[in-house]
Image (tube, rainbow, N blue to C red):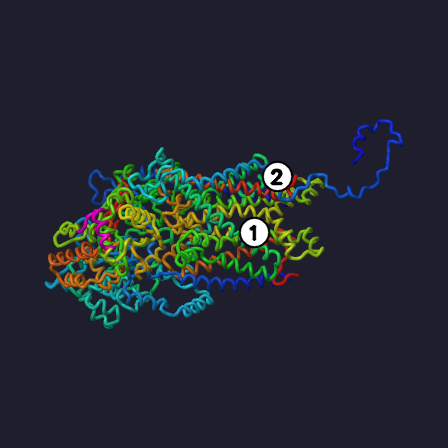
Amino acid sequence: MGMVRYIANKFFYMIVSLFVLISATFFLMKAIPGDPFTSEKAVPPEIKAHLYEQYGLDKPLYHQYFKYLGDIAQGDLGVSMKRLNQDVTHLIGQTFSASLKLGVVAIIVSVIVGVILGMLAALYHRKFIDSAAMVLAVLGIAVPSFVVASLLQYVFAYKFSIFPVSGFKGPMYYFLPVAALSAQPIAFIARLTRSSMLEVLHADYIKTAKAKGLSWMAILSRHVLRNGILPIVTYMGPMTANIVTGSVVIEQIFGIGGIGKQFVEAISVRDYTLIMGITIFYGILLMVARFITDIAYVLVDPRIKLTGGKEG
Amino acid sequence: MKKSKSLLLMIAMVLVIGTALAGCGGNNANKGNNAAATNAAGNEGSTNTGTATGDEKLAADQTLRVNLSAEPPTFDPAQAQDNQAHTVLQTMYEGLTHVNAETGQAEPGIAEKWDVSTDGLVYTFHLRDAQWSNGDPVEAADFVRAWKRVLDPATAPAAPYAYQLYYLKNGEEYNTKKVTDFSQVGVKAVDAKTLEVTLKSPTPYFLGLLSFYTYYPVHKSVEGNAKWAISKDTMIVDGPYTLTEWTTGQSIQVTKNEKYWDAASIKLSKIDFTLVNSGATELLSYKNGELDRAGNPNGEIPSEQLPMVKKELPNEFVSKGIASTYYYEFNITEKPFSNAKIRKALAMAINRQVLIDNVTKGGQLPAFGYVPPGIAGADGEYRTAVKDSYFTEDVEQAKTLLAEGLKEEGLTALPPVELSYNTSENHKKIALAIADMWKNNLGITVNTVNQEWAVFIENRQHQNYQIARAGWVADYNDPMTFMDMWVTGGGNNDTGYANPEYDKLIADAKASSDLAKRQEDFAAAEKMLIQDDMVILPIYYYTNNSLTKEYLKGVTTDFSGAVDFTRAYLLEH
Amino acid sequence: MASDKNMSSLDANLKPEDFQKIGIDEKQAEVIQRESLSAWKDSLERLRQNKMAMTALVVLGLIVLAALIGPLFSKYNYYSNDLVNSNQPPSSEHWFGTDDLGRDIFVRTWYGARISLIVGLAAAAIDLLIGVIYGGIMGFFGGRVDNIMNKISEVLYSIPYLLVVILLLVVMEPSLFTIIVALTITGWITMSWIVRGEIMQLKNREFVLASRSMGAGSKRLLFRHLLPNAVGPIIVTITLSVPNAIFAEAFLSFLGLGVQAPIASLGSMISDSLTGWMYYPWRFLFPAILISLTMLSFNIFGDGLRDALDPKLKK
């Protein structure tokens, strides 16, 4: 089975699942009480009727749904219903850029720190370093991210004035949010690395390699790391999509205009087009990340074969 | 060996990048410090303009940094409907009048002077020689265009605040398509500099209304360009500042408009708005010197920290009453709250002062009426003339009333009551405290129900609740903005209250231009609303709690708590 | 060997009559000398030897116990207000101090721990059940089955979580059960992916091939060979799903959609105290320490369990 066929197949499935995602989200969203024009100071019914008419909300639900599908098919995400006349794509672009920058740095930090911690723990299994590395890693998941973020902010921004409290205007603004954002992935990666490396270290082929007199470095990089990294690869896909699509908590606490914060706001004001736009964007991102994960699996572990449709 | 080398290389690279990043950061911080140093050292001679008194020295850098807790969804005055947009729009636009925050009186804005007909129906405005930011003159036609946009049912999307212009003759009729010819609407450009406005009925507060954003003029370039209000390049304005930067979710910046007619009295060169929606973060940023002002109305000091902030920063903290009321609404269409005695019992069984001192902590005023202090009456404040002594807190009497009410309803005990509020730390605390007071004082079981904002609003507007939290902010400076809510079938009357006598009092007040008579009508109506029927349960009158750095001067807030930064300036610090 | 004792005297003068033929005792060939241990007994033994893990288990036990009986030791309840005595530091009257409504933090902390544990354990159990079955099937059958099931989980994972939660809270009565349902609706997916990845990797291993060639059916392969070998990562994931669920509830509390007040959970207590923790550290510290201790114990115990269960780590 060729790579082209494999990718084409995956692509087909991706389109189908996107369609399901769009449909599910669309009806879910409409099922929730409230609409973009719900406000504490009630808008008079005549004006509300105008608004519904202009946004097509007066039409039956199936009509709105097919109209939306038609627009999407033409690649049109529409304009926001709350942020008047602003294109959904423009809004996503602006807020995603902040989340992406922050997310990429956080992923790099998490993988490096996590893998190193996990490796150290596995290599010095049941020794002090193991415990120390694991306690350090566990602390990352033992404290909720909003606590980590608030503490970091108070201590390093306010008490010691090393970093700014809020905003996103330059390199100095990265440190605290990145630290808060990577605490949990570091812990997860370190633990997965340790767990799967321990397994690999006891495998026969490692003993064989040792017996053959291969250098420790060669064993580590060629055998241990390569095999031990598989579960991390599984985790990496969703993690990347998760981190890159922004953390509401971190963005809220550090006052960063990221896509996570925007999404929560869009949901809260029922900005239908923006909710759909971000959902689709997030869905595609996640699917691509999972696709790359699958490819990465094949590259890392030659025993796994590409299976497009049927099992050979 | 090759693989291991590449691994090491990767690790090394990352470490290098990390160090470089840290290095950059360090440099940046140094730069910041240097900049601060130059600022401090280099401000001699450059600042002697304006009205600063002898011992006040203006800072060299006149950039004001403030926060907005929510991003304004639009800068189109016809579409705006929130106080965040108000704050920013006020820096960019000027209407016919603007309201002096101190006196509450309308003062000339774009209109230099005006004449009012004796029946109070026709206003003739004479515009001054003002310019748009692109140099075009501001003309009467710009107002006509703007108001037509607001009222035109074909405007896409429809202006949600169009009803703010229903004071104009045929304004409502044109908006609801009963009149299709705009020339019948009460606004006319007599000539380039003269605007004639005809009202539906005499409206004593009309001049104040004109300072509201829905009444702002718009430049002719907005026609045919739906996206004009989202780009700094197409926003042509007539106010003290122009939009120079807008990054979604991040920041908004306005810069002094040299074409503004009163540019000489504008001292700030820029206003930087950050968009942080966490009160705790905003406060920390302020304390850390990243903001010059924090707190209401555009942000919020967490109530937890209010007592400490008052103590730590006594010279910067200001608490000021504003014309807004916090109250609970009863759904009076369903048992048991269809019974006025039961409603009264609940209102009397709360200790408002204890609630304010220990829960809200913002120095709010206990409310026993609906119209808050700060709203103008016939002569001075309405609340001063008409005392809100409609009921007192009295647990014993509350118990008696509850017993009587239950008997009337044929009940032996009050079934568990549901008290709903929309998601917010403060609403939650208040609801829990009040529920506990009712439980202790009256022995009733209260379930507090937290609802997501839009769900809550939908439920309340569809009378799908028993008791719900509410708050009302004045739209304009007149008791009418509070009182006309409760007329039968009113758009914001979520209680189901329908009282023909009440309706008549409000209708009379609307038709009258006799201030004393109107005040009497309002007083009678409010007595009916609270003392007789207890349709709503007043809790407190809001305060604005804010922090202002001592070097920041000239920031004003009006009766409703809206803040005006346009005339602010920064002293050397 | 029977003649072991003579081995030491090899240099002695040996005569032919010292030797006798014993032949092959068929019965002895299969006898296992070491005491027979079942896999579970063996694991248990190794777990018992792991001091860190046992300490964690004891701590967890204590936390559960305190969550159950802690509130009984105080005369206060978790919901009654005492506004005049709000935000009081710890004293002999209120051991952990009081919160913003004057409620006793000692009682609320243990009560909150109870709620958090219920939420965490229930959600993790459901995640485990659905995740292992779903992920196992995906990984084992591969091909089209995998593709479709994988896509379904992906779609579910992509549906905006917050929308689902808001709708659930509207449709269902606001209760603990609703929160647990909300947490598990997407919570199991991560577990299923981990299992899938493991199975995909394991199913091409030699021992699986061997078993398959000896005629083992799918069920036997999956439950006797693949899943037991994937138990390490599964346990690591469970020990993370409990804290994840507890934190997810805390996150919902942060957004104001967590358990209904005045019910306390550790997460909601922390998020309530977050805006003023620098002034009222006790309101923040006790629940935060308890939540961290719970997490720490879960994780350390999970690690120990993992080491103990993994047959490949036998010394």
Q: Are marks 2 and 1 on the same chain?
A: yes
Q: Position of residue B446 (x, y in %)?
A: 32, 51
Which SS does the magenta portion mostly show? helix
Residue visible at 78% across and 43% down in the picture: C27
Quarter where residue A47 is shown = bottom left
Q: Position of residue C129 (x, y in %)?
A: 54, 53
Q: CA distance from mark 2 to mark 1?
A: 28 Å
Q: Is B458 located above or below residue B314 in the figure?
A: below
Is B391 magenta? The answer is yes
Q: Which residue is mark 2?
A: C45
- What residue range appears in magenta? B390-406
Q: Which residue is mark 1?
A: C194
Q: Is residue A151 left or right of residue B351?
A: right
Give whichever of discs 2 and 1 has the lower sequence position.
Answer: 2
Q: Amino acid at mark 1?
A: Ile
Q: Is residue A281 left or right of residue B377?
A: right
Residue A145 badge: none
